[in-house]
């Protein structure tokens, strides 16, 4: 695997968290790039420690922030799992989709929901994010929610076709069109799962039906759960001038950079399957999982 | 699918709690061919659920450091593949698995699952001590993933047969995946067989599970669609919450 897509070896892992902290918290004092060499960073921290005689607020930020990945790093992590660890794509999509469904049950526990609130609209795009959505819908059905899928642009990929068959054979309805009038969606469903676009996909790349669906979902008043990144957000900057505002974000494997701008109610990470060595290699620091949970709340 | 592999019409539907070997094969065929599940998918679901069953039977907080060590003995067929996935998930759940997988299948799925375990630093034993006391002392429990329902004990080679002979004398807990290896899947004739403490039935219990007399019997079958369950007239306990296994 080329190192160009891996972490920058000249940056110590601790620095990467520090740099990320700055990017995501612009109200921190302006350090100026010149100070961000390794020696300067270390001495800066030490000076602050001495100044306050306790764990510095920077370190506190480090400890509370989940480290986020750039799009290139996320792609490199996935490539490592597929090529070095020999995970199958079917396996990874199944693990992510199952964990996403578990996250939905944690954010919206079934016993507290009325019959109508259990109805879930899952909007799937044509790429991997959509495949994860299909698996998520199937597990939601197993967990006794009532999913309906809108999957307008069906991939010809074998994995997508098989996942679609599994959902169809489990009697999960597929909508042939999505109402443009958002009030119809608000009234018919209890919540919506956005599995349209993942980090690597440009919004302009997908076709009309997905773009129109996203336009409708922007006006949603029922809860919205986004898988990996809110569809339409820039994965790096989280620029969402025009984008979705999900209530729940389920980061797959590790949070992406744009997750720093997520301001909804719950942020889960579905990354238990990521081996420790991979996590260390990408200098990811993630919350501990309890028991056999496959998702952790951030 | 031929109706010959369907449920026995003389059995009342609400009584059916077990599958014959032929029915188990038919159920799997239906999942693979009609429902288009992938084998990788099913093995992952079964292996993950098996690991969850182990955590329910032997919860981590109650175990000492030595008791967290788990020996997973994997055979060359699908049962062994499930064992490899189970070992990986046990590692994720912070147990300390070690794998004994003497007869490595050349099948791509097995090779990939083996790589995943190796890359996660799960040790693979090159030989299994014939002196069972060494196993009793080194591990807290053993997972038996040697033989599944469709495999004749005589079909597998020497190392697996010897491993089973050693495991019969085990005094630490034993968890068998799907059926206790070496049992006849129909009759449960176990004159010479393993006596597991825990049985984790995959998809649905097999007939021989009727003779299981250990502490815990789990079913790892949440992924089986309702229609398939109805088709085979299976009646099994409900799952709670997001659990993938249910205790019988």
Image (cartoon, coloured by chain):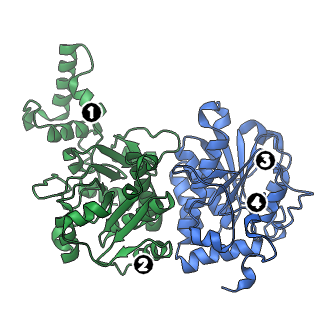
Chain colours: A green, B blue
In the image, residue A44 sits, relative to residue B146, either above or below, namely: above
Q: Is residue A17 above or below residue A295?
A: above
> Pointer 1: what residue?
A62
Q: Which residue is tagged 3?
A: B129
Residue pictured at 26% horizontal, 51% vertical: A256
- In the rendered image, which residue does mark 4 sit on? B179
Estimate the spatial distance between the alpha carbons at disc 3 and disc 1, rounded to whole Å: 48 Å
SS of the residue at dot 3? loop
Mark 4 secondary-structure assignment: loop
Q: CA distance from mark 1 to mark 2?
A: 42 Å
Instruction: State which mark lies toward you, 3 or 4.
Output: 4
Disc 1: host chain? A
- Separation of disc 1 and disc 4 at Cα? 49 Å
Between A297 and A52, the residue placed more toward the observer is: A297
Q: Residue A152 — which label?
A: none
Quarter holding residue A48: top left
**Residue A131 visible in the picture:** no
Q: Is residue B185 above or below residue B242?
A: below
Percent position of residue B158, x then y: 81, 63
Give the residue pinned by disc 2. A161
């Amino acid at each position: 695997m080329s190192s160009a897509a891996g972490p920058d070896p000249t940056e110590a892992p601790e620095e990467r968290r520090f740099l990320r902290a700055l990017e995501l918290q612009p109200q921190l004092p302006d350090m100026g790039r010149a100070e961000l060499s390794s020696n300067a960073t270390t001495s800066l921290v030490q000076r602050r420690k001495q100044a306050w005689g306790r764990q510095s607020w920077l370190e506190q930020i480090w400890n509370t922030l989940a480290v986020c990945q750039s799009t290139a790093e996320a792609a490199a992590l996935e490539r490592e799992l597929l090529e070095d660890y020999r995970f199958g794509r079917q396996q990874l999509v199944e693990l992510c989709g199952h964990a996403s469904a578990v996250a939905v049950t944690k954010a919206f526990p079934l016993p507290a929901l009325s019959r109508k609130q259990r109805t879930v609209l899952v909007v799937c795009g044509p790429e991997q994010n959509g495949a994860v959505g299909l698996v998520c819908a199937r597990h939601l059905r197993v967990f006794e929610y009532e999913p309906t899928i809108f999957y307008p642009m069906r991939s010809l990929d074998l994995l997508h076709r098989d996942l679609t068959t599994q959902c169809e054979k489990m009697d999960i309805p597929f909508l042939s069109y999505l109402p443009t009038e958002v009030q119809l969606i608000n009234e018919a469903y209890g919540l919506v799962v956005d599995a349209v676009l993942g980090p690597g996909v440009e919004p302009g790349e997908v076709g009309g039906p997905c773009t129109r669906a996203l336009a409708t979902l922007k006006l949603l008043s029922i809860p919205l759960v986004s898988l990996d990144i809110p569809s339409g957000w820039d994965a790096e900057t989280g620029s969402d001038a025009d984008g979705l505002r999900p209530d729940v974000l389920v980061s797959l494997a590790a949070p992406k950079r744009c997750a720093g701008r997520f301001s909804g109610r719950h942020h889960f990470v579905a990354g238990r399957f990521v081996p420790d060595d991979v996590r260390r290699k990408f200098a990811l620091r993630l919350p501990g999982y309890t028991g056999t949970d496959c998702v952790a709340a951030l």
